Structures are given as structure tokens and as C-alpha cells.
Amino acid sequence: MSEQYPQQPKLSTITGKGGLEVTVMDWGATIISLKSPTKDGQEKREVLLGVKEPDQWHTQGCYFNATIGRFANRIANNSFELNGKTYKLDSAAQHCLHGGKDGFDKRRFTLKSGTPNQLVYTLHSPDGDMGFPGNYDLTVTYTVGDDNSLTIHYQATCDQPCYTNLTNHAYFNLNGHNSSALGHTLKLNSDSFLPLDPLSIPTGEVRPVKGSAFDFTTPKTVGRDFMQDEQMQDAKGYDHPYLIAGDLKSSFATLTSDDGKLTVDIYTDYPAFQFYSGNYIYSPDAPIAARDDGKPYPNQSGLCFEPEYYPDSPHLPQFAAKNPIIDKDHPLDKTIKYRFNV
């Protein structure tokens, strides 16, 4: 990076006629605030986790509401093979997480254009960046609709074949204040998930959710079956990929606040999403002060629904049809949409 993240962040706010208000920071093309009206018409609620002091955006290690790339989630053993060549990725851990130690969440994006309801950001990632091949160009477009929706559109090209996986790491708490999110009611339109090994790498199995703690096909509180499956022991809760239709025609997730006054429906054309129940938000060595009361966010104070390709897809050839490689003739073109029901 040419600058130290996040010097002099540039903030931009967009709104819709329905009242939804979204503020984005150019560092990481990060949503630092998302405020929605509620069903009772009272003051707008802040529905995303955020920090108390601006300079804490770069010290929190939870990827709060940032653009994640080049490859969201994990790639096992920091390497993959493509067209007969092995690529070693730049990561401080055993497995590459969210693009490596200097992922897109830590990059300054360029704000190319802005209107009252839309922001367009771009980023160039050179050949060899974090070990990935090819010159990679990304456009991220945020659009607020008059139906109280926020749409995120990713467009990316690369001049060499490359694995990629873009998402936003939004942490939702629809209660509007620092609190546990385990009381939220959740419905997921998914009948299967990918079991993980102890280091959160998919085993290659596809497991049905029916009859397990992972079954949200009928609405239930997030906390009802929390930690009631051996798959949750290493992850300290939910932190698993669910498989979905990915057609944007119907929501894959519906989340409702504890008091029932705010609901968000989430849509995507990705074939999967990672449901993460915020199991590692709190660290005694680096607590994150909540924006509203300044007290440390506890674990499970925010919920993430990360639309994406399958984690570790370079090592899952049996799912190649669901996890394409991009190049100059086959760009990435994916959408995430949050629609708030007020």
C-alpha cells in the first residue's frame, strides 16, 4: 500500500426515499454505518456493528463490514495449483483467510462516482499481489433503493486465470445497540451445509441440515440450538458454509430483531454463504469498543451472512461447476442485496 491504512478516510453517505441511510469509507470500501427505519416509525436504527473512535477501524481485527478479497474465506495451506503452476499466498496463518495479511479490506479504494443514492468504487490489484496471479481490477457499486434496500454489485476482471471470491463482511445486530444477537429470529432457505475440519476447511462432504442444529428452514432464534452440534465445538458456534440456489429471485436469509420491529431479507446470486455468529468478536487483548456505549462488544453481538463461492474451492474440484475461475473473457459479476422490511 502507498499509504498507511487508514489515513484520512473519505466518507460518503447515500440515502433512499424510504429512509435507508448508508455511509461508506474508501478504506476497504467499508460500510461504516447502515441506518434503517423501524416498523413503529421511531428513530432510525443502526443495524451494523461499528467502532467508538474512527481510528479503531484499522485496529479491529474482525473485518467489520468491509469488502473481502481477492478470495473471501479460506484457502488451505496458503497455496493452490492452476494450469500446472503452484501459487503460494502471503498469509501469516496456516490457511489463507480473506485474501491474505493485506487483503482488500485494508486497501484504499478510489471513489469513481457518486450520486445521492449510489457510490462506485474501484481497486487495482497487480499481478502477484498476495501471491495471486494476474492484474485484477474490481468495481464495487453500492446502491440504495427506495424500497429500503442496499444492493452491492461486484464486477472484476483479471488478465490471467485466477480464483476469486468477493463478499462483504457485514455484522448485523438489528436491536440497534450493543447486545447479544442470539435472540434474533432467523430463517434460512438452505437444506444443506458443508462440514468443516477443526481448522475450518471444508471436508468435501455435503450434509443435510434436517434434524440438526443447523436447520433454520423453519424460523427459530439463533441461540435456540447454539453449540448443540459437534461441528460447532471448534468454531465456537456457527461459522459454516450453507448451499443455496443463488438466483436473486428469493431471499436466502430473513433475520428479525428481538423486538420484531425490524427485519432484513438477504439475496444473492452466489451459490453459498458463510453464516458466522460472531464467535471471536471479543478478545481480552484487543477489545472493540462499541459505537453506542463504548463498552466492549461481546461474542455473538453480531451475525454475518457472507455470500460467496465455496470456501477452499481451489481444492474442491468436485464442485468446480459452482466455483468458476475468472479471466479476461469470464469476469466476476455478482450481487448482494439487503432489503429492510419496515
Image (cartoon, helix red, strand yellow):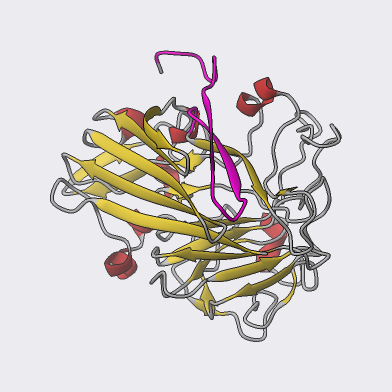
Q: Can residue 212 be seen?
A: yes
Q: Residue furthest left?
A: 329
Residue 223 image offset from top left, x and y in percent: 79, 67
Left or right: residue 91 compared with residue 331: right
- Asked if the magenta segment contains residue 328, the reply would be no
Q: Residue at x 40, y 13 (%)?
A: 2
Location of residue 135 with respect to 195 vertically, above or below: above
Q: Residue at x 71, y 51 (%)?
A: 302
Between 258 and 208, which is closer to the camera in this rendering?
258
**Where does the magenta region start and end?**
2-28
Q: How many marks?
A: 0
Q: Can residue 97 be seen?
A: no
Q: Residue furthest front?
A: 17
Left or right: residue 298 compared with residue 159: right
Residue 260 image offset from top left, x and y in percent: 79, 68
Q: Quadrant of residue 53?
A: top right
Residue 86 image offset from top left, x and y in percent: 25, 41
Q: Quadrant of residue 50?
A: top right
